[in-house]
Amino acid sequence: MKFEPTAESISKHEVPQWYNDAKFGIFIHWSLFSVPAWAPVEGKNLAELSESDDGFGNSMRNSPYAEWYLNTSRIEGTPTNLHHKEVYGENYNYFDFQGKFEEANKTMSADEWADFFKEAGAKYVVLVTKHHDGYCLWPSEYKNPKMPEYQSKRDLVGEITDAVRARGMKMGLYYSGIFDWTFKDYPIDGMENWVNHHVVTDEYAEYSWNQTEELIHKYKPSILWNDIGFPAQCDLNELYADYYNTVPEGVINDRWRQYSVHSDEEKKRLVEKLNKQLAEGGISGILVPEGFCDYTSPEYANEMKLQKKKWELTRGMGMSFGYNQNEDPKYMLKAKEIIYMLVDAVSKNGNLLLNVGPRADGSIQEEQKKPLLETGKWLKINGEAIYETTYWEKQEAETEKGQQVRFTKKGNQLYAVILDEELDASVVIKDLEIPSGATVTLLGEAGELSWEQKGENLSVKIPENIQKQYAYTLKISC
């Protein structure tokens, strides 16, 4: 159908089946911040840091996000500010990392990246084309009015897009629509300046609009992933209609907030509102959508619940999205954690968008590669319980031993994924009844399994010498 630039027309857009089916995507944060590649590490993610008394200010001053290096280095006395002075000198300008990044990334191979993402089991990829530092990974026709040469001469977006699509994965593009620190010379150190950074000039609004439209028409991304917000001067219904009409299979996320602040009193009320949302919902609370979206994108969410509206959990392999050379490997996700997170999200109508932060030269540290490749290996055996499935009437259960179980379904198939590396000779799933004529198999193993209904509990006999896995899937055919 053709979409009109009205709220009524846009509201009729439905999430395409491919996105519901894909389940697992890879996020890529890679830009100038990959050169210093540094942020303080306290063993807490941004959401957890925001829970202190001065939550938001604390999370800004001690941000574990290496991709926020420019902002945190601008806040006097912060760990990042002190690190920058010690390593690069007090007068070294962040924007001078451009030359170092462009020299280093000459060795980056988009084909190697795409091969890796495919092997990890990803069905889609989302690339950061411009983060808050303002650097563009493509030679845009719409140059930054403050810094016209502040963009890549090499079309990194195009190369990565082509490589990803050549391997059968969908390609999405992230764009920082509202924050651009080439237009603001003061840091975000609290909620008031968070709001101030949402108030942009007409010049910036036009620049942001033009670049977003350029990304839509030049690369036709299957996902348009905006971050934080978008200039209030822009008509989002017009943008959405153009995107959907250009990319019929496209989906948009939820981070398109628009703030019109015309007085100090309006700003004060908005700051109070956001502080309240922060207290109630953490960092994701201040990103709650206020308008149309295809899906929501909670960040570093610790607890997952079934949501009828499609959602996507996003987070880094560690505490940062951009590569952080200061991060202790003990804070990096292991394969088992990734698998359990993915299964949990899928059982509750979610996707998982897991970030990879390459080094400036495009290489990816082993602590990120190994667990993702192990996840891909698990998905080769258990993928039918993940891809192209939907949530069941019941999302969770336990075995008599206390092992966690998650459910997905596909047609007449019910999948019960047991989140444990060990299975006893007999597994009893509590409060699970299946039809008398059902067959039960274990993915990765041949033959049907013996089972019996013990009241409201299902008891399944597990064969000896099964191959070791991080989690095991019982396929119940009804």
Image (cartoon, helix red, strand yellow):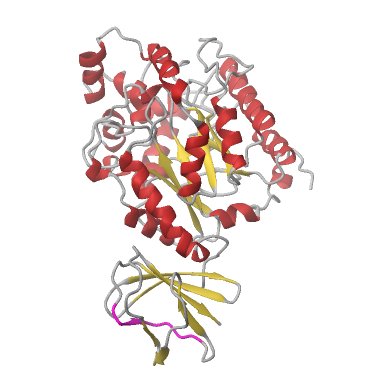
Q: Nearer the viewer, residue 234 or 411?
A: 411
Task: Specify the farthest residue to the right.
Answer: 2
* 432 in magenta: yes
Q: Residue at x 52, y 65 (%)?
A: 384
Regarding residue 105, the answer to whether it shows in the image is: yes
Q: Residue at x 36, y 31 (%)?
A: 191
Q: Is residue 452 left or right of residue 247?
A: left
Q: Nearer the viewer, residue 42 or 254?
A: 42
Residue 116 lies, in percent from the top left, at 46, 42
Residue 415 lies, in percent from the top left, at 48, 72
Q: How many marks?
A: 0
Quarter-of-image position of residue 330: top left
Magenta highlight: main SS: loop
Q: Residue at x 57, y 39 (%)?
A: 164
Q: Residue at x 61, y 24 (%)?
A: 211
* 384 in magenta: no
Residue 96 lies, in percent from the top left, at 39, 11
Regarding residue 132, the answer to whether it shows in the image is: no
Magenta residues span 424-434
Please determine whether, in this image, residue 398 is positioned above or below residue 137: below
Residue 315 lies, in percent from the top left, at 39, 44
Q: Quadrant of the C terminus?
A: bottom right
Please determine whether, in this image, residue 365 is positioned above or below residue 87: below
Please determine whether, in this image, residue 90 is positioned above or below residue 303: above
Please determine whether, in this image, residue 170 is positioned above or below residue 384: above
Q: Is residue 158 left or right of residue 187?
A: right
Q: Is residue 397 left or right of residue 128?
A: left
